[in-house]
Amino acid sequence: MPENSVADQSTLAGSGSPLGLLKDYLALTKPPIIVLLLVTAAGGMFLAAQGVPSVLLMALVGLGGALASGGANALNHYLDRDIDGVMRRTRRRPVPGQRIGPTQALAFGVTLNVVAFVLLAVWVNLLAAVLTLSATLFYVFVYTWWLKRNTPQNIVIGGAAGAIPPLVGWAAVTGGLDLPAVYLFAIVFFWTPPHFWALSLLIQEDYREAGIPMLPVVVSRRDTILHILLYTIALVAITLMFFFTKAVGWVYASSAAALGAWFLWLAWRLFREDTRSRARWLYLYSLLYLALLFAAMMVDSSLDL
Protein backbone atom coordinates (compact mmCIF):
# COMPACT_ATOMS: atom_id res chain seq x y z
CA MET A 1 0.00 0.00 0.00
CA PRO A 2 1.54 3.33 -1.04
CA GLU A 3 3.20 5.48 1.62
CA ASN A 4 2.39 4.75 5.26
CA SER A 5 -1.37 4.77 4.95
CA VAL A 6 -1.71 3.15 8.36
CA ALA A 7 -0.53 4.73 11.60
CA ASP A 8 3.06 6.04 11.74
CA GLN A 9 5.42 3.63 13.45
CA SER A 10 7.92 6.14 14.82
CA THR A 11 6.59 5.41 18.30
CA LEU A 12 8.24 2.00 18.11
CA ALA A 13 11.65 3.59 18.04
CA GLY A 14 14.01 2.60 20.77
CA SER A 15 16.96 4.31 22.38
CA GLY A 16 20.16 2.51 21.41
CA SER A 17 19.92 -0.72 23.34
CA PRO A 18 19.64 -4.06 21.49
CA LEU A 19 15.91 -4.05 22.19
CA GLY A 20 15.67 -0.48 20.95
CA LEU A 21 17.53 -1.37 17.76
CA LEU A 22 15.22 -4.33 17.22
CA LYS A 23 12.22 -2.05 17.60
CA ASP A 24 13.70 0.38 15.11
CA TYR A 25 14.17 -2.37 12.52
CA LEU A 26 10.60 -3.47 13.17
CA ALA A 27 9.50 0.13 12.66
CA LEU A 28 11.15 0.09 9.22
CA THR A 29 8.71 -2.64 8.13
CA LYS A 30 5.55 -0.66 9.11
CA PRO A 31 3.70 -3.62 10.74
CA PRO A 32 0.13 -2.23 10.50
CA ILE A 33 0.46 -2.01 6.73
CA ILE A 34 1.68 -5.60 6.61
CA VAL A 35 -1.34 -6.81 8.59
CA LEU A 36 -3.82 -5.15 6.23
CA LEU A 37 -2.05 -6.47 3.15
CA LEU A 38 -2.05 -10.00 4.58
CA VAL A 39 -5.79 -9.78 5.21
CA THR A 40 -6.38 -9.01 1.54
CA ALA A 41 -4.03 -11.82 0.48
CA ALA A 42 -5.94 -14.21 2.75
CA GLY A 43 -9.19 -13.07 1.15
CA GLY A 44 -7.82 -14.06 -2.24
CA MET A 45 -6.79 -17.46 -0.89
CA PHE A 46 -10.16 -18.23 0.70
CA LEU A 47 -12.02 -17.14 -2.42
CA ALA A 48 -9.79 -19.22 -4.71
CA ALA A 49 -10.11 -22.28 -2.46
CA GLN A 50 -13.86 -21.74 -1.97
CA GLY A 51 -13.27 -22.63 1.64
CA VAL A 52 -10.43 -22.73 4.12
CA PRO A 53 -7.07 -23.08 2.32
CA SER A 54 -4.27 -25.31 3.54
CA VAL A 55 -2.91 -23.99 6.82
CA LEU A 56 0.65 -24.61 5.63
CA LEU A 57 0.02 -22.71 2.41
CA MET A 58 -1.50 -19.81 4.31
CA ALA A 59 1.50 -19.72 6.63
CA LEU A 60 3.95 -19.71 3.71
CA VAL A 61 2.08 -16.98 1.83
CA GLY A 62 1.72 -14.98 5.04
CA LEU A 63 5.41 -15.24 5.86
CA GLY A 64 6.50 -14.47 2.31
CA GLY A 65 4.08 -11.59 2.04
CA ALA A 66 5.13 -10.13 5.40
CA LEU A 67 8.81 -10.30 4.48
CA ALA A 68 8.27 -8.71 1.07
CA SER A 69 5.99 -5.98 2.38
CA GLY A 70 8.32 -5.25 5.27
CA GLY A 71 11.25 -5.10 2.89
CA ALA A 72 9.41 -2.75 0.53
CA ASN A 73 8.56 -0.48 3.44
CA ALA A 74 12.19 -0.46 4.57
CA LEU A 75 13.21 0.59 1.05
CA ASN A 76 10.57 3.32 1.25
CA HIS A 77 12.26 4.57 4.44
CA TYR A 78 15.58 4.61 2.60
CA LEU A 79 14.32 6.54 -0.44
CA ASP A 80 12.15 8.95 1.56
CA ARG A 81 14.73 9.77 4.24
CA ASP A 82 15.09 13.36 2.99
CA ILE A 83 11.40 14.24 3.08
CA ASP A 84 10.81 12.17 6.22
CA GLY A 85 13.29 14.44 7.97
CA VAL A 86 11.20 17.48 7.00
CA MET A 87 7.73 16.25 7.88
CA ARG A 88 6.75 16.49 11.54
CA ARG A 89 4.92 13.17 11.47
CA THR A 90 7.93 11.23 10.19
CA ARG A 91 11.06 13.03 11.33
CA ARG A 92 11.52 10.67 14.31
CA ARG A 93 11.58 7.54 12.17
CA PRO A 94 14.72 5.38 12.49
CA VAL A 95 16.56 6.67 9.40
CA PRO A 96 15.97 10.45 9.67
CA GLY A 97 16.35 10.03 13.44
CA GLN A 98 19.84 8.61 12.72
CA ARG A 99 19.30 5.43 14.72
CA ILE A 100 19.63 3.25 11.60
CA GLY A 101 21.90 4.24 8.73
CA PRO A 102 20.56 4.55 5.16
CA THR A 103 22.84 1.75 3.95
CA GLN A 104 21.58 -0.58 6.69
CA ALA A 105 17.94 0.22 5.80
CA LEU A 106 18.66 -0.45 2.12
CA ALA A 107 20.40 -3.76 2.84
CA PHE A 108 17.61 -4.80 5.21
CA GLY A 109 14.91 -4.08 2.61
CA VAL A 110 16.71 -5.89 -0.19
CA THR A 111 17.46 -8.91 1.99
CA LEU A 112 13.86 -9.31 3.12
CA ASN A 113 12.66 -9.26 -0.48
CA VAL A 114 15.24 -11.78 -1.66
CA VAL A 115 14.26 -14.16 1.14
CA ALA A 116 10.55 -13.62 0.37
CA PHE A 117 11.03 -14.38 -3.33
CA VAL A 118 12.99 -17.57 -2.70
CA LEU A 119 10.51 -18.77 -0.09
CA LEU A 120 7.48 -18.21 -2.34
CA ALA A 121 9.15 -19.53 -5.49
CA VAL A 122 10.34 -22.75 -3.85
CA TRP A 123 7.46 -23.58 -1.49
CA VAL A 124 4.43 -21.91 -3.10
CA ASN A 125 4.78 -21.25 -6.84
CA LEU A 126 6.69 -19.00 -9.21
CA LEU A 127 3.69 -16.85 -10.16
CA ALA A 128 3.03 -15.94 -6.52
CA ALA A 129 6.71 -15.07 -6.08
CA VAL A 130 6.84 -12.94 -9.24
CA LEU A 131 3.65 -11.07 -8.32
CA THR A 132 5.01 -10.36 -4.85
CA LEU A 133 8.30 -9.06 -6.24
CA SER A 134 6.45 -6.95 -8.81
CA ALA A 135 4.50 -5.29 -6.00
CA THR A 136 7.74 -4.32 -4.28
CA LEU A 137 9.34 -3.05 -7.48
CA PHE A 138 6.26 -1.02 -8.40
CA TYR A 139 5.97 0.46 -4.91
CA VAL A 140 9.64 1.34 -4.65
CA PHE A 141 10.52 2.50 -8.14
CA VAL A 142 7.24 3.63 -9.73
CA TYR A 143 5.48 5.11 -6.70
CA THR A 144 8.14 6.12 -4.16
CA TRP A 145 10.95 7.07 -6.52
CA TRP A 146 8.96 8.59 -9.40
CA LEU A 147 5.24 9.29 -8.96
CA LYS A 148 5.16 10.48 -5.36
CA ARG A 149 7.32 13.54 -6.00
CA ASN A 150 6.05 14.39 -9.47
CA THR A 151 2.29 14.08 -9.81
CA PRO A 152 -0.85 14.52 -7.67
CA GLN A 153 -2.08 11.26 -9.21
CA ASN A 154 0.72 9.45 -7.37
CA ILE A 155 -1.56 7.58 -5.03
CA VAL A 156 -3.99 6.59 -7.79
CA ILE A 157 -1.39 4.90 -9.97
CA GLY A 158 0.78 3.84 -7.05
CA GLY A 159 -2.19 2.12 -5.46
CA ALA A 160 -1.64 -0.77 -7.86
CA ALA A 161 1.19 -2.00 -5.62
CA GLY A 162 -1.10 -2.44 -2.65
CA ALA A 163 -3.71 -4.15 -4.81
CA ILE A 164 -1.42 -7.05 -5.75
CA PRO A 165 -1.59 -9.14 -2.51
CA PRO A 166 -5.06 -10.55 -3.33
CA LEU A 167 -3.64 -11.67 -6.68
CA VAL A 168 -0.81 -13.38 -4.81
CA GLY A 169 -3.31 -15.18 -2.59
CA TRP A 170 -5.33 -16.34 -5.58
CA ALA A 171 -2.24 -17.44 -7.51
CA ALA A 172 -0.91 -19.33 -4.50
CA VAL A 173 -4.01 -21.53 -4.49
CA THR A 174 -4.76 -21.87 -8.21
CA GLY A 175 -1.42 -21.29 -9.90
CA GLY A 176 -3.07 -18.75 -12.21
CA LEU A 177 -5.23 -15.63 -12.33
CA ASP A 178 -8.96 -15.43 -13.12
CA LEU A 179 -11.73 -12.82 -13.22
CA PRO A 180 -12.49 -12.90 -9.47
CA ALA A 181 -8.84 -12.06 -8.79
CA VAL A 182 -9.15 -9.04 -11.09
CA TYR A 183 -12.14 -7.85 -9.04
CA LEU A 184 -10.12 -8.19 -5.84
CA PHE A 185 -7.35 -6.11 -7.41
CA ALA A 186 -9.90 -3.47 -8.49
CA ILE A 187 -11.46 -3.29 -5.02
CA VAL A 188 -8.16 -2.47 -3.32
CA PHE A 189 -7.11 -0.20 -6.20
CA PHE A 190 -10.22 1.97 -5.92
CA TRP A 191 -10.17 1.87 -2.12
CA THR A 192 -6.69 3.39 -1.94
CA PRO A 193 -7.40 6.98 -3.16
CA PRO A 194 -10.29 7.82 -0.80
CA HIS A 195 -8.43 6.20 2.08
CA PHE A 196 -5.18 8.03 1.48
CA TRP A 197 -6.65 11.37 0.42
CA ALA A 198 -8.59 11.44 3.70
CA LEU A 199 -5.28 11.08 5.51
CA SER A 200 -3.70 13.70 3.24
CA LEU A 201 -6.38 16.20 4.27
CA LEU A 202 -5.16 15.82 7.85
CA ILE A 203 -1.46 16.32 7.09
CA GLN A 204 -1.46 18.43 3.93
CA GLU A 205 0.81 21.08 5.48
CA ASP A 206 3.45 18.42 6.07
CA TYR A 207 3.32 17.49 2.38
CA ARG A 208 3.37 21.12 1.30
CA GLU A 209 6.44 21.77 3.42
CA ALA A 210 8.19 18.72 1.98
CA GLY A 211 7.27 19.67 -1.60
CA ILE A 212 5.21 16.53 -2.22
CA PRO A 213 2.31 17.19 -4.66
CA MET A 214 -0.37 15.22 -2.85
CA LEU A 215 -3.82 16.13 -4.15
CA PRO A 216 -4.89 18.57 -1.38
CA VAL A 217 -1.58 20.41 -1.85
CA VAL A 218 -2.15 21.17 -5.55
CA VAL A 219 -5.96 21.54 -5.68
CA SER A 220 -8.50 22.88 -3.22
CA ARG A 221 -9.72 20.80 -0.31
CA ARG A 222 -13.17 20.94 -1.89
CA ASP A 223 -11.89 19.34 -5.10
CA THR A 224 -9.99 16.73 -3.09
CA ILE A 225 -13.13 15.79 -1.17
CA LEU A 226 -15.09 15.58 -4.44
CA HIS A 227 -12.46 13.12 -5.72
CA ILE A 228 -12.85 11.12 -2.48
CA LEU A 229 -16.62 10.95 -2.96
CA LEU A 230 -16.38 9.90 -6.62
CA TYR A 231 -13.83 7.17 -5.93
CA THR A 232 -15.92 5.92 -3.01
CA ILE A 233 -18.94 5.63 -5.29
CA ALA A 234 -16.87 3.69 -7.82
CA LEU A 235 -15.45 1.46 -5.08
CA VAL A 236 -18.84 0.54 -3.65
CA ALA A 237 -20.21 -0.09 -7.15
CA ILE A 238 -17.37 -2.51 -7.90
CA THR A 239 -17.84 -4.39 -4.62
CA LEU A 240 -21.54 -4.88 -5.44
CA MET A 241 -20.88 -5.82 -9.07
CA PHE A 242 -18.59 -8.55 -7.78
CA PHE A 243 -21.62 -10.42 -6.45
CA PHE A 244 -22.97 -10.90 -9.97
CA THR A 245 -19.89 -12.89 -11.00
CA LYS A 246 -21.19 -15.70 -8.74
CA ALA A 247 -17.74 -15.92 -7.15
CA VAL A 248 -19.19 -14.68 -3.85
CA GLY A 249 -22.47 -15.23 -2.06
CA TRP A 250 -25.02 -13.45 0.06
CA VAL A 251 -22.85 -13.11 3.16
CA TYR A 252 -20.38 -11.07 1.14
CA ALA A 253 -23.10 -9.16 -0.75
CA SER A 254 -24.95 -8.05 2.38
CA SER A 255 -21.70 -7.11 4.09
CA ALA A 256 -20.48 -5.15 1.05
CA ALA A 257 -23.78 -3.28 0.87
CA ALA A 258 -23.81 -2.36 4.56
CA LEU A 259 -20.12 -1.47 4.78
CA GLY A 260 -20.30 0.46 1.51
CA ALA A 261 -23.37 2.41 2.56
CA TRP A 262 -21.57 3.67 5.67
CA PHE A 263 -18.46 4.52 3.66
CA LEU A 264 -20.61 6.56 1.26
CA TRP A 265 -22.35 8.27 4.16
CA LEU A 266 -19.07 9.33 5.72
CA ALA A 267 -17.76 10.58 2.35
CA TRP A 268 -20.99 12.52 1.77
CA ARG A 269 -20.84 14.06 5.24
CA LEU A 270 -17.29 15.22 4.56
CA PHE A 271 -18.41 16.64 1.21
CA ARG A 272 -21.20 18.56 2.92
CA GLU A 273 -18.99 19.86 5.73
CA ASP A 274 -15.19 19.81 5.56
CA THR A 275 -13.84 19.35 9.07
CA ARG A 276 -10.77 17.58 10.43
CA SER A 277 -12.98 15.40 12.56
CA ARG A 278 -14.95 14.10 9.58
CA ALA A 279 -11.80 13.56 7.52
CA ARG A 280 -10.30 11.61 10.43
CA TRP A 281 -13.42 9.46 10.82
CA LEU A 282 -13.41 8.68 7.10
CA TYR A 283 -9.74 7.74 7.19
CA LEU A 284 -10.11 5.48 10.22
CA TYR A 285 -13.26 3.85 8.90
CA SER A 286 -11.61 3.12 5.55
CA LEU A 287 -9.10 0.89 7.36
CA LEU A 288 -11.88 -1.00 9.12
CA TYR A 289 -13.90 -1.16 5.90
CA LEU A 290 -11.27 -3.00 3.89
CA ALA A 291 -10.47 -5.44 6.69
CA LEU A 292 -14.15 -6.27 7.30
CA LEU A 293 -14.95 -6.55 3.59
CA PHE A 294 -12.24 -9.17 3.07
CA ALA A 295 -13.17 -10.89 6.33
CA ALA A 296 -16.74 -11.17 5.02
CA MET A 297 -15.34 -12.64 1.83
CA MET A 298 -13.50 -15.29 3.84
CA VAL A 299 -16.58 -16.16 5.88
CA ASP A 300 -18.68 -16.29 2.72
CA SER A 301 -16.25 -18.69 1.05
CA SER A 302 -16.09 -20.91 4.12
CA LEU A 303 -19.84 -21.17 4.54
CA ASP A 304 -20.52 -21.65 0.82
CA LEU A 305 -23.97 -20.04 1.07
Image (cartoon, helix red, strand yellow):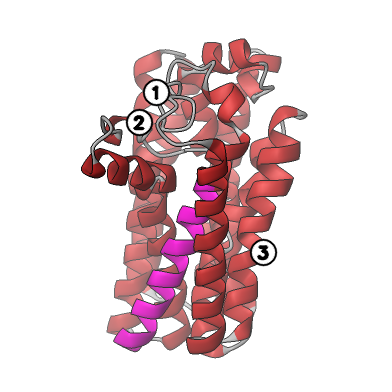
174 or 249: nearer the viewer:
174
58 is within the stretch colored magenta: yes
102 or 305: nearer the viewer:
102
Q: Position of residue 67 (x, y in %)?
A: 45, 63
Q: Residue at x 40, y 54 (%)?
A: 34
- Amino acid at the residue labelled 1: Arg
Mark 1 in CB contact with mark 3 (< 8 angstroms): no
Q: Earlier in the sequence, mark 2 or mark 3?
A: 2
Task: Quickly name the residue at label 2.
Answer: 10
Q: Earlier in the sequence, mark 1 or mark 3?
A: 1
Mark 2 in CB contact with mark 3 (< 8 angstroms): no
Is there any visible trace of residue 295 in the rendered image?
yes
Mark number for residue 134? 3
45 is within the stretch colored magenta: no
Q: Which residues are magenta?
A: 53-74
Q: Quadrant location of residue 46?
A: bottom left
Q: Quadrant of the C terminus?
A: bottom left
Instruction: Tell me how many marks there are.
Output: 3
Q: Helix, strand, or loop for circle 1?
A: loop
Which residue, as the protein is rendered here, is positioned at the far front? Answer: 17
- Amino acid at the residue labelled 2: Ser
Q: Earlier in the sequence, mark 1 or mark 2?
A: 2
Mark 2 vs mark 3, CA separation in Å: 27 Å
Mark 1 in CB contact with mark 2 (< 8 angstroms): yes
Viewer-side label of 2, 3: 2
Q: Helix, strand, or loop for circle 2?
A: helix
Is there any visible trace of residue 1 in the rendered image?
no
Task: Quickly name the residue at label 1.
Answer: 92
Q: Position of residue 211 (x, y in %)?
A: 67, 16
